[in-house]
Amino acid sequence: TQYSQGNSYTENTAMLQQIHWNYQPPNIDQRIRVAVLDTGLSPLQPLIWNQVVASATMIPRETNAWDYRLSPGTNNSHYYQDIAGHGTMVAGLIQLLAPDAELVIVRVCDNYGRSDSWKIIKGIAFALENRAVLANLSFGSVAQPSALEYAIEDAEIDGLVCIAPLGNNNLHQIMYPARNNHTIAVSGIDNLDIKASFSNWHGGADLASP
């Protein structure tokens, strides 16, 4: 749905049904504000944008937190960017599972999924500034950047909890920032509730999710 006016709610619901995921959102009086630090949100998804209370891009020479593919040949590449669309998918799933949630969209990754500590730290600061209480960080690194570690710890003190994946390399390890003790580290499971073939695994995981 990143490339069309398609209904992300319908398409994401169909996708979750493929893994037998029958989730009923709880009745919560308080509106939860969730930050999505990812590739942004497609400009072709007005229904999701209606839930957005703040957005920003940390990518140089960009003005919008838009998630979309550039044409072939851009950035000295002859291939379409495989990562473009990831942020839209994540925001759409949050809208599906928590339809009353308010979204803070922060584009910290480019269309190839590349980022760095400074962009992510600025993204966390933007999420805090806009009073998000959860931040979804769908990326990882084998390096342990000290500045990012401190930013995540300070964010928790200020009321922002970061959630990150162990990694998608089918290895017995936790990628950073999930390895930080102040994040919620999540591994992936399949429709049989066992480890997804691609997911990393480790005793330090806090949760497992489809």
Image (tube, rainbow, N blue to C red):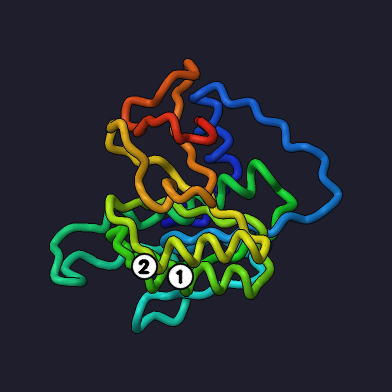
- Left or right: 86 as drawn, with respect to 22: left
Residue at the image position 72 percent from the left and 31 percent from the top: 24
77 lies above or below 85: below
- Left or right: 57 as drawn, with respect to 8: left
The residue under label 1 is 121
Residue at the image position 49 percent from the left and 67 percent from the top: 151
- Residue 202 position in % (x across, y down): 39, 31
For the residues labelled 1 and 2, say whether their Cβ atoms are less than 8 Å apart.
Answer: yes
Residue at the image position 41 percent from the left and 53 percent from the top: 177
Q: Can you name the residue that lies furthest to the top here?
A: 192
Q: Nearer the viewer, residue 64 or 153?
A: 153
51 lies above or below 199: below
* Among the 4 quarters of the image, the one containing residue 198: top left
- Residue 83 position in % (x across, y down): 32, 54
Kind of residue sitting beneath label 1: Ile
The residue under label 2 is 117
Q: Nearer the viewer, residue 181 or 48?
A: 181
Residue at the image position 40 percent from the left and 54 percent from the top: 85
Cα–Cα span, label 1 and label 2 = 6 Å
